[in-house]
Image (cartoon, coloured by chain):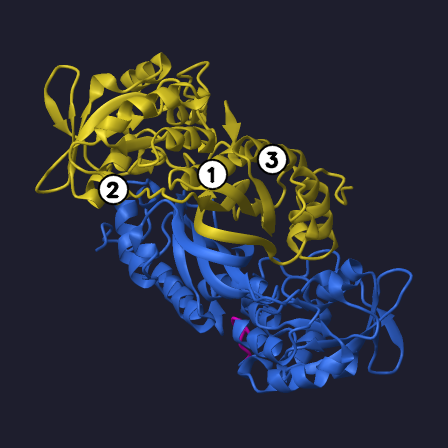
Chain colours: A blue, B yellow
Amino acid sequence: MRADRSGQILLAHGSGGRLTQQLVDSVFARGLSNPILVRMEDAATLDFQGRLACTIDSHVVSPLFFPGGDIGRLAVTGTVNDLAVAGAEPMHLTAGFIIEEGFAFHDLERIVESMSEAGAEAGTDIIAGDTKVVEKGAADGVFVTTCGIGRVPDGVDISAAGARPGDAVIVSGTIGDHGITVLSQREGIGVATGLVSDCAPLWPLVRDMLAAAPGIRVMRDPTRGGLAATLNEIAQASGVAIEIDEAAIPYRTEVRSACELLGLDPLILANEGKLVAVMAQEDTEAVLAAMRSNPHGRDAALIGRVEAAAAPRVHARTLIGSRRVISMPTGEQLPRIC
Amino acid sequence: MRADRSGQILLAHGSGGRLTQQLVDSVFARGLSNPILVRMEDAATLDFQGRLACTIDSHVVSPLFFPGGDIGRLAVTGTVNDLAVAGAEPMHLTAGFIIEEGFAFHDLERIVESMSEAGAEAGTDIIAGDTKVVEKGAADGVFVTTCGIGRVPDGVDISAAGARPGDAVIVSGTIGDHGITVLSQREGIGVATGLVSDCAPLWPLVRDMLAAAPGIRVMRDPTRGGLAATLNEIAQASGVAIEIDEAAIPYRTEVRSACELLGLDPLILANEGKLVAVMAQEDTEAVLAAMRSNPHGRDAALIGRVEAAAAPRVHARTLIGSRRVISMPTGEQLPRIC
């Protein structure tokens, strides 16, 4: 039931009145239906006992639709993955939409459908939402903010501060797929034909990893700022050095070629379906075996180790055998990647 | 420590790299400091047992600063109030910021300070956050999405579907203050000089009300769409009619005058520090007494009653003694009110 025959979102869809009700009923409640959401209370409620994990992410990706995903899939996976790398099983999500006047109803429906699909992959659902509409020109299409709550299983204690000298550093698969996919959609840069974003919810992979080794010390998803930012965050939080072997990092051919062509450092490219994990050396084999049995960890690889250090730092053994410092990225390589 | 001497947010502040770290450290961690936030993990964790309430709201108010508040205060109170009207004590908030390139650091700091102050009033804090920066023109200043989690005390069961024939309908104070305040700031309309937004966290008021009568059946905060939308939502969810007495609704003189001058219906004006409550007649006196002892319920008033009805509807006895239907608002009276 659409009040607007032009198929576009109107300012009145954000008024809190009849059109807001129609938008919520026709797009959100229908697309995301679950027993908690349909109650349509100002707050969703549920019984909970244990260690609760909570995270929030705003999503402003441009373009909104890209090979392998869209802002809806990204909004669910981004939040699910922040829970997953805290070792938390995602339970429920909430979503806030900021929509530009004139946005196509049909596109909003596609985004909500993607959110529903990605939620199902992750075993989660959207139990509360909010919609605001701003005038044409006051936002760019749609922004989606998702908040997630999850449950940390007993005995799991994952923290960026947990890395210890001697630990192994693992990455769950090829690096840079999302960054190059979005970049190649922008401004008509026709690189990386056939590449798709890796955008995927990682909880099933993390569950398998924790089953293999509940004592995994650190997990992080290298999104904005890429592997370089994530490894530096871990080194800083843990007060250690991390040495990685550049030759061990898995890349798709399309990503490697695009980086060479455009002069990009693949270590700062964003990923949306990958994680970095740090664990005791003796856990490495079991965790890698578990990861490689999961579709999202098929290309998992041991890429480095943690070392004691007077000052936190990350460095790489390069393909030609030298060492280079991997710094925390500065400047903006590609805005609105997620 | 600011990397940008111009005092403006740069795209690189959203890159996930060094400038993002500096922004988070210098503005968010400093302005919102608490033991969970400072851990700076991808997800915040805490122990919880009981009935959990969860809500999300995106805030796009324009102007960002207005008499009585700003988008930061609004973002905290909006979410705290959605928890409170579910009967839930607010525990923690998470916040996602979407910032337009070029936004003033100083304004962001003011907004974060307001969030911290409003959080303290409500007895809550911000335990996780996210920041995205979009190009100049792709957003309007800053949008803030807040998600809240709270705990519903045992025995409390509040729902829009709870109203029963014979129940009393109460409002916690003067209606329309926020709507007219924001309107008078827009486009140089110089009405309502001296009026300030009612923007305030209502948990302390709700706590007092529940202490007086734990069996309160419905609470809702009449934000967008005002009293008209809220009463219609309650009537629809409960399958009842609601009759209100227009003469009993409290208004400030400035709001009444502005509505007369501009031809606005005060029942569809937004409020950000008011609630509507429905309860058994026998609870009315105790609840009103408790409300009037709280600064945010000083002007609380009994405004109507619930009646049995074949079809849900809301009507008002007017000042001249006739009856008029109060419909769910259609169209958009004032965009970006919250």
Q: Pinpoint the chain carrying mark 1.
A: B
* Residue A246 in magenta stretch: no
**Relative to B76, is A169 on the left or the right?**
right
* CB under 8 Å between discs 2 and 1: no
Residue at coordinates 38% horizontally, 47% vertically from top-left? A101
Q: Residue A218 carries which label?
A: none
* CB under 8 Å between discs 1 and 3: no
Q: Residue B80 carries which label?
A: 1
The residue tagged 2 is B162
What kind of residue is marked 1?
Val
First in residue order: circle 3 vs circle 2 = 3
Q: Distance between the residues labelled 1 and 3?
A: 13 Å
* CB under 8 Å between discs 3 and 2: no
* Residue A197 in magenta stretch: yes
| Place of residue A92 in the rendered image (x, y in percent of width and height, measured from the top left) | 45, 60
Snapshot quadrant of residue A142: bottom left
Q: Pinpoint the chain carrying mark 3.
A: B
| Place of residue B30 in the rendered image (x, y in percent of width and height, measured from the top left) | 70, 40
In the rendered image, residues at marks 3 and 2 fall on the same chain: yes
Q: Nearer the viewer, mark 2 or mark 1?
A: 2
Determine crowd level at label 1: few under 14, some 14-19, many 20+ residues with C-alpha closer than 10 A: many
**Relative to A40, is A69 on the left or the right?**
right
Determine crowd level at label 3: few under 14, some 14-19, many 20+ residues with C-alpha closer than 10 A: many
Nearest the camera: B301 or A33? B301
Does residue A101 sit above or below A268 in this rendering?
Answer: above
| Place of residue A292 in the rendered image (x, y in percent of width and height, measured from the top left) | 61, 86
Identify the secondary structure beneath mark 2.
helix
Q: How far apart are marks 2 and 1 (CA)?
A: 21 Å
- Tell me the magenta residue range: A195-201
Identify the secondary structure beneath mark 3.
helix
The residue tagged 3 is B116
Nearest the camera: B177 or A10? B177
